[in-house]
Image (spheres, rainbow, N blue to C red):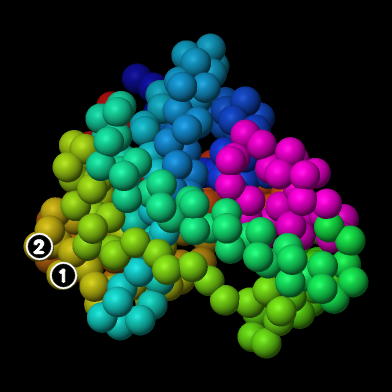
Amino acid sequence: MTLLKADLHVHSNYSDGFDSVRDVVKRAKETGITHLSFVDHDTVDGFPEISRLAERFDITIIPGIEISAYDFKRNRKVHILGYDYQPKAEHIKAICEPILQKRHEHSLWQIRQIQSLGYELDVNRITEQALPSKTIYKQHIMKELTDAPYDSSEYKQLYQKLFKNDGVASGDIVYADAFDAVKAIVADGGLAVVAHPGQLDSYSIIPELVEVGLGGVERNHVDHTVVDHQMVEAHAKEYGLVMTGGTDYHGAFGEPINIGDITSPINRLLR
């Protein structure tokens, strides 16, 4: 009997991850992962390549996405994971394409703002280096600005200076409504899951999202504490939700962690 080991939260360079899909799948295979889900932000563009590589490396791939959503009632971000949806993902694409367009336009504005301070940024080079992502993310801009590691004080200080508080490139786009995100995933036959509720304090909206089809909540995440685990378990039990988990792996664009260091509880997605 094969021992199941699943990481259901990894990112690639189809969004804001550093590594290629091939590198991620290869690393997953080396760490004994049997089930893997790429949940790149607001895009399913990588799935054809992911599927080909999964067959080559003999890993079960679960279609995934992480939708950048918002709780307008409480004025806070809430990310919604979507799993095992229909290949065409028509409703998911419809809600995500405006997000990607707004994010890209905002990133171009951020580049101009940073250039106004005297920093040299080559938009064409950033755009090319971001590929296969068609959207520029802050991580791509930071890569052009510094070679310092993501978890270094140098990187964090520069990021805070430019993108946070009163930084010239601070601010964010308007995300999709969390309820619409859940509905889109469900309409495409998928399982909608609240991502890392402990990280974004998303617990309050869970009962409301259940009413429109929410089917799960992420338990295992690098930012979750023992208290978060207990809260997720309580919500899962009360509302009959599936629990998921993973590393939130971004490679060099994220906190140091290896694929498979955090795995998903065994659930109906793993088959």
Quarter residue 220 falls in: bottom left
Span colored in magenta:
122-148
Query: Closer to the camera, 201 or 157?
Result: 157
CA–CA distance between discs 2 and 1? 7 Å
Q: Is residue 56 above or below residue 161?
A: above
Tell me: 222 left or right of 211: right
x, y percent for residue 25: 57, 28
Q: Is residue 48 above or below residue 68?
A: above
Q: Is residue 28 magenta?
A: no
Proximity of marks 2 and 1: CB atoms separated by less than 8 Å: yes
Question: Which quadrant does the C terminus fall into?
Answer: top left
Under mark 1, the amino acid is Pro
x, y percent for residue 66: 41, 50
- Going by the picture, which residue comes out furthest to the top? 56
Residue receiving disc 1: 207
Element at badge 2? loop
Q: Is residue 100 above or below residue 238?
A: above
Q: Can residue 71 be seen in the rendering of this structure?
A: yes
Q: Can residue 267 be seen in the rendering of this structure?
A: no
Report the label total: 2
Question: Which quadrant does the N terminus fall into?
Answer: top left
Residue under the image location 83 percent in, 52 percent down? 122
Under mark 2, the amino acid is Glu
Residue receiving disc 2: 211
x, y percent for residue 260: 54, 42
Tell me: 239 left or right of 234: left
Tell me: 180 left or right of 142: left
Q: Is residue 126 magenta?
A: yes
x, y percent for residue 7: 46, 41
